[in-house]
Amino acid sequence: MSELTLLILQLAFLALLWVFIFIVVYAMRSDLFGQRVRKLKEPATAGAPAAAAAGQTAPTGQAAPTPAAAAQAGPPAPSAPAPKVPTFIPAPGTELSGPPRATLANASRLVITSGAKSGSEIPLGSEPLTIGRSSDSSVVIRDDYTSTHHARLMIWGDEWVVQDLDSTNGTFLDGVRVTTPTHVPLNTPIRIGATSFELRR
Amino acid sequence: MTTAPVATAPETPPKGIRRIRVPQKLRNLELFLLLFVCGVNALSVVLVQLGALGVADFTVVTIGAGLAVLVLGLHVALRIVATNADPFILPIAALLNGLGIAMIYRIDIAENLTGWESTALRQVVWSGIAIALAIAVILVIRNHRVLQRYTYIAMLVAAVLLLLPMLPVIGQEIYGARVWIHIGAFSFQPGEVAKIALAVFFAGYLVSRRDSLSMVGRKVLGMRFPRARDLGPILVLWALSMAIIIFQRDLGTALLYFGLFVVMIYVATGRASWVVLGVGLFLVGAVIAGQVLVYVNDRFTNWLDAFNPEHYDAVGGSYQLVQGLFGLANGGLIGTGLGRGRPDITPLAQSDYIFASLGEELGLAGVFAVLALYLLFISRGFRISFAGQDDFGRLLGVGLSFTVALQCFIVIGGVTRVIPLTGLTTPFMAAGGSSLVANWIIVALLLRLSDTVRNQPRLVI
């Protein structure tokens, strides 16, 4: 073996080591940079990309899209994404009539009722679900209105409870903003950004 | 949780319910990385032979292939019982282990060791045992929360393991440190395994006690310090590590255990005052030990004044440290080439000084690659803990990955003369069975944690 061959082999070996490292880093890029923001199909005018870019990098609580962008690109929902409304306090657990609370026993699936993936469902286990834009969430919602760690569905006793994790644009249970952990009734829409879902039997 | 119906890409969502079974993407990525790693490891052994002997001898590569089969066995076990486990941890550990074996084999060639005398062969056998144990851990522990039940048993196990080397017959003193036990032809360092038991104990203990450790206390200089009566645990741990310094004469292990506890209590309570307290306590202890104990004092002078001929020539002086530095310097940017340096001049080049040996033959580029591998491994561990749902799992994940990080820092910092040199093993690389067993069990536990945590979302909208 000549010196030159050995030198080339050595360089090739070092290159291979670094190639391995870069493959690993490339494969975990979504952990480093977060999920890509999904562009909504509705009028994507000049304001929307800016809001998307801002929302992509900013962590929870700072990702407020500008009101103009929100108005242009937002879903035609009654309570469009707005800055926090501190005066609005719902009364959790006050509904005496209406659908029964979702429990481990009677709720078996989470169904998306509106938004980009409406119609899909995931089975509910006996473990909590996290919802947000970060890739470690159980349900990843990639739109401009969702915070990195937006909300979670927990189990108290054996009943499903939704908790807002101090998200920028709020979590709405049946149109009412969730401020404290609130019991979820069956077949009642929970809205996060442009996506609504229900817990069903 | 094993069924992961994910509705994938189509832009216009058709009405109706879709369930699509996803292929095991994570495991396929892992398989690809593993095959890549096996190739790199085989190449490293061949390069060592070409450099040191001039000919390639493929019988050695066949022995290594046995290890590759075991690692793939672990991969298959993950496919069955931990589908969502992290795909990067196993390949990174396998690569580090393989590089270590290649380097140890290179030192063997220089010292003319063959057969069962050969450290590399023993290292291969130990790696096999360690990986088999990792498979067993993955298969037996199906949920990490089970470990929380054994919080206090873990404490007892750790205490027994720490005391074993002090026993008269099986305890053994090597190079002044009394941390080995010796049964028949085997010698084992129980302290390595004790760190896992300690991490389990700390996690279980801190989950139940974190409130009293974090809520109350007096505010001094903008930092909330704990009450005097809450200082008990940290003082006990401090006394334990001081006892290790005095009786077992092992600085590194003491620093490792104490650092582990301080970091875990910091993560559990979120209060920096614990770190201030812990670092302060340890510095006070180390300074006192440096004044009182001769061997600690020697370590300090060897570190601060390494190039003084007086220390260099002294018995137990800085000869080893300085030779390691010369080796690193000789390596330069791209190294002398595998098998073509003189790493064997440094005493213990295959265990404590394996990092300097690698630095000589792979150069700065190779050393940084190794450091990057450790960085990726540890960052995966923290990532798994960060994404965890239950406090016990999060703390355990932080503790386990931090032991690897701290161990790397202590030993590599010692070799490169950043901190005083203490004898600890470089995780996955250094020759030594107990270290391999402990680190592969850590790998298995992290894989188990990451499977429970589920890195992959169930549904992407």
Image: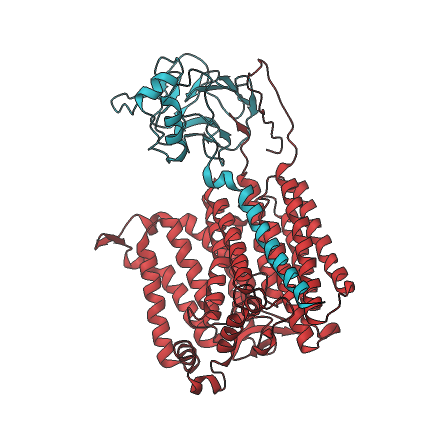
Chain colours: A cyan, B red
Quarter of image, res B55:
bottom right
Q: What residue do we see at 26% from left, 25% from top? A: A86
Quarter of image, res A183:
top left
Left or right position of B227 against A125 = left
State whether residue A147 appears in this view.
no
Q: Quadrant of the N terminus of chain B?
A: top right
Q: Residue furthest left?
A: B221
Which percent across, then down, holds residue B34?
66, 49
Q: Residue furthest right?
A: B59
Q: Is B75 rendered above or below residue A154?
A: below
Marks counted in the figure total 0
Please state which of residues A78 and A5 is positioned toward the viewer in this rendering: A5
Q: What residue do we see at 39% from left, 49% from top? A: B268
Q: What residue do we see at 35% from left, 60% from top? A: B232
Which percent across, then down, holds residue A82?
31, 21
Left or right position of A171 against B448 = left
Please state which of residues B223 and A82 is positioned toward the viewer in this rendering: A82
Which percent across, then down, holds residue A181?
38, 28
State whether residue B91 appears in this view.
yes
Q: Is A178 rendered above or below residue B313?
A: above
Left or right position of A157 against B425 = left
Which percent across, then down, holds residue B18?
61, 20
